[in-house]
Image (cartoon, rainbow, N blue to C red):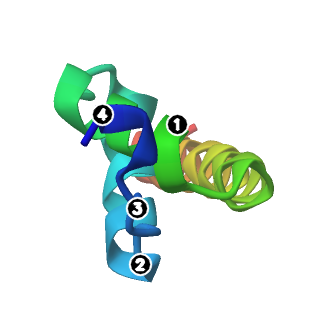
Amino acid sequence: MPEDNQHHKKPGLGAIVLSILAAGIGVQSDKNRERDFAGGNPLAFVVGGFIFTILFIVCIALVVGLVLSHSGN
């Protein structure tokens, strides 16, 4: 059977989260990227990417605020 006729398994929530985190820090493997494109829902990755970005910005802002508050300024 040709590879095009193989049923691609949809990635679960854990796989989507790991893919978003790996892609967010730039270490996504080709194997996982191909799996995501073959069976993943693009909307899940877009929404997850936005959530990851917002959480990342909030965490950086909190760390900077904490450091500045303890620096004596």
- Above or below residue 33? Residue 56 is below
What's under tag 1, amino acid-wise? Phe
Of callouts 1 and 4, which one flags the residue occurring earlier in the amino acid sequence? 4
Of callouts 3 and 2, which one flags the residue occurring earlier in the amino acid sequence? 3
**Which residue is located at x 41 percent, y 78 percent?**
12
Residue on which the image places disc 4: 2
Of the residues tagged 3 and 2, which is closer to the observer?
Answer: 3
Distance Cα–Cα, label 1 vs label 4: 18 Å
What's under tag 3, amino acid-wise? His
Of callouts 1 and 3, which one flags the residue occurring earlier in the amino acid sequence? 3
Residue contact between numbered discs 3 and 2, judged by CB atoms under 8 Å = no
- Above or below residue 42? Residue 2 is above
Of callouts 2 and 4, which one flags the residue occurring earlier in the amino acid sequence? 4
Dot 2 alpha-carbon crowd within 10 angstroms: few under 14, some 14 to 19, many 20 or more:
few
Which label sits on residue 7? 3
Dot 3 alpha-carbon crowd within 10 angstroms: few under 14, some 14 to 19, many 20 or more:
few
- Image quadrant where one finds the N terminus: top left
Of the residues tagged 2 and 4, which is closer to the observer?
Answer: 4
Distance Cα–Cα, label 3 vs label 2: 15 Å
Of callouts 1 and 2, which one flags the residue occurring earlier in the amino acid sequence? 2
Which label sits on residue 37? 1
